[in-house]
Amino acid sequence: MLNYFIMCRSLTYAQKSARVLERAGIPASVSRPPAEAGDEGCAYAVRIAEKNLPRALVALKNAGMPSGKIYMTDRSGRFSEVPG
């Protein structure tokens, strides 16, 4: 299963985003982004399953939550940025 990481600028935003997603019925967890995700400083990420990405983006937008870059894991475990 592929996972997506929605970057957030702080732990607080990541936690709020995860709560928004959970209320929308989308399982989400907060984690530090992988090193391959770039030098986002003290950023955090919300991890979701591939099948939930479209619904997650709509839920975050409707809640007025800012989201940053999105990264995905491929089947080999490598991370890559999802084109915006």
Image (spheres, grey):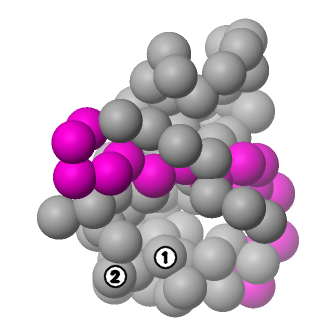
Who is closer to the viewer here, 6 or 65? 6
Who is closer to the viewer here, 70 or 46? 70
Up the image or down, 23 lies above or below 80; here it is below
Name the side, left or right, on which 45 lies relative to 23: right
Q: Distance between the residues labelled 1 and 2?
A: 6 Å
Name the side, left or right, on which 40 lies relative to 73: right
Name the side, left or right, on which 66 lies relative to 16: right
Q: Mark 2 points at which residue?
A: 51
Number of numbered markers: 2
Up the image or down, 27 lies above or below 34; here it is below
Q: Image point 36% across, 48% down: which residue? A: 73
Q: Mark 1 points at which residue?
A: 53
Residue at far front of view? 76
Which quadrant is home to the C terminus? bottom right
**Where in the figure is residue 12, as x and y percent of width and height?**
63, 35
SS at badge 1: helix
Up the image or down, 10 lies above or below 1; here it is above
Up the image or down, 23 lies above or below 17; here it is below
Segment colored magenta: 62-77
Queried whether the magenta region covers residue 26, the answer comes back as no
Q: Image point 74% across, 55% down: which residue? A: 67
SS at badge 2: helix
| CB under 8 Å between discs 1 and 2 | yes
Queried whether the magenta region covers residue 71, the answer comes back as yes
**Where in the figure is residue 82, as x and y percent of width and height?**
63, 58
